[in-house]
Image (spheres, grey):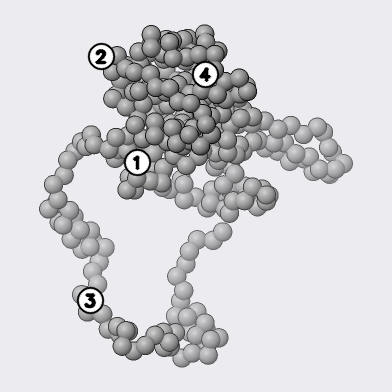
């Protein structure tokens, strides 16, 4: 894929000649004259420095807040300039279709790297190629824990209300009961209420830490109470908070889900965002979405057994190799 280059005057003249036209205005001859604007009353062009100075002067008229705590989970994070540079690299933006991997290595490689880093960040075994957003990830996470005997979901009252709504919507369409657990006066999950809510039919307990109110939950107690009752634990996390907090894998949860917007997605009037999902090897087959793996292939006549490994923690140290006949 080559970089974009503007067309030259000679190139434009050649294209017009191929179309049998003398000038570019003839391309718009089908537009009625009464609706055409032949001459725009625009000011003279300015240099880049002049434009930047003018825009900065306009921006200074706005009231600026250094810290904005509004957003209910969607905040203006610092995004290093290198993020755009890396994600725009041509080797990562080749066309992606899961049925033609041989011409899609760029995007497949970037997804593989993403999955590996999510596993390293969360301490989980396997990560998928993401879902729509954090709320969708939470809903998918609790549903993947269901089995024939367990079909009930327990959700902490301290989770994000929008996430709670999405979970209930997903579960309502599948006739999955949802039980909510209240919070204590300390704005944390009431462990006694949790133990009482978890039953032999409970498939998963969903809790968010830090929770919607910014409190770090007692995940050790929540995981212990849930696992004692035979139910799985789905933990909602903030990826930035995992830089200083214990990972979901260290707590022993079964599924880790989160919103990836803090990792480098600018605010965009509510989206699009990124739903992070990671789980244990035991639940790998129930993980929704796609998983990009690493493989070693061989061609005849040197055809040793091929091996395939899913992106998991720790990250494989050897790159994919190809053996060819001498």
Q: Are marks 2 and 3 in contact (CB under 8 Å)?
A: no
Residue 185: which disc? Answer: 2
Calculate the distance from the C-alpha at mark 1 to the C-alpha at mark 2: 36 Å
The location of residue 324, given as percent across then percent down, is 79, 43
Query: Which quarter shows the C terminus?
Result: top right
Q: Earlier in the sequence, mark 2 or mark 3?
A: 3
The kind of secondary structure element at disc 4 is strand
Above or below, 183 against 17 in this view is: above
Q: Earlier in the sequence, mark 1 or mark 3?
A: 3
Task: Report the mark closest to the observer, 4 or 1.
Answer: 4
Q: Earlier in the sequence, mark 2 or mark 4?
A: 2
- In the image, 146 versus 259, the foreground residue is 146
- In the image, 159 versus 167, the foreground residue is 167
The location of residue 12, given as percent across then percent down, is 47, 80
The kind of secondary structure element at disc 1 is loop
Task: Report the mark closest to the observer, 1 or 2.
Answer: 2
Task: Tell me the quarter of the picture where residue 211 sits.
Answer: top left
Calculate the distance from the C-alpha at mark 4 to the C-alpha at mark 1: 40 Å
Task: Tell me the quarter of the picture where residue 37 sits.
Answer: bottom left
Q: Which residue is mark 3?
A: 42
The location of residue 214, given as percent across then percent down, is 29, 24
Q: Residues within 10 Å of mark 1 (few under 14, many from 20)?
A: few
* Residue at horizontal 30 percent and vertical 20 percent from the top: 215
Q: Which residue is mark 4?
A: 202
* Residue at horizontal 52 percent and vertical 31 percent from the top: 175
* Residue at horizontal 46 percent and vertical 10 percent from the top: 225
Residue 79: which disc? Answer: 1
Calculate the distance from the C-alpha at mark 2 to the C-alpha at mark 3: 62 Å
Q: Residues within 10 Å of mark 2 (few under 14, many from 20)?
A: few
The residue furthest front is 175
């Amino acid at each position: 894929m080559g970089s974009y280059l503007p067309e030259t005057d000679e190139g434009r003249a050649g294209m017009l000649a191929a179309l049998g036209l003398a000038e570019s205005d003839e391309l718009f001859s089908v537009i009625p004259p009464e609706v055409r604007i032949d001459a725009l009353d625009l000011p003279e062009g300015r240099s880049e420095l002049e434009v930047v100075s003018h825009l900065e002067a306009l921006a200074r008229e706005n009231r600026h807040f250094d810290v904005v705590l509004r957003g209910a989970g969607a905040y203006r994070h610092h995004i290093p300039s290198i993020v755009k540079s890396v994600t725009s690299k041509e080797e990562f933006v080749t066309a992606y279709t899961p049925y033609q991997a041989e011409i899609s290595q760029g995007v497949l490689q970037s997804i593989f790297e993403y999955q590996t880093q999510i596993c390293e960040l969360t301490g989980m075994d396997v990560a998928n190629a993401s879902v729509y957003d954090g709320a969708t990830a939470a809903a998918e996470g609790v549903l993947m824990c269901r089995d024939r005997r367990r079909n009930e979901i327990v959700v902490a009252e301290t989770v994000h209300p929008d996430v709670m709504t999405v979970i209930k919507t997903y579960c309502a369409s599948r006739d999955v009961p949802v039980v909510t657990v209240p919070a204590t006066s300390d704005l944390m999950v009431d462990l006694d209420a949790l133990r009482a809510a978890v039953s032999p039919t409970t498939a998963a307990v969903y809790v968010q830490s830090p929770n919607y109110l910014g409190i770090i939950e007692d995940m050790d107690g929540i995981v212990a109470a849930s696992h004692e009752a035979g139910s799985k634990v789905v933990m909602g996390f903030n990826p930035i908070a995992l830089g200083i907090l214990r990972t979901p894998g260290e707590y022993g949860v079964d599924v880790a889900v989160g919103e990836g917007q803090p990792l480098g997605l600018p605010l965009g009037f509510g989206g699009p965002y990124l739903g992070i999902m990671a789980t244990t090897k035991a639940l790998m087959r129930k993980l929704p979405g796609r998983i990009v793996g690493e493989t070693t292939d061989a061609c005849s006549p040197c055809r040793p057994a091929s091996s395939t490994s899913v992106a998991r923690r720790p990250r494989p140290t050897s790159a994919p190799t190809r053996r060819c006949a001498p």
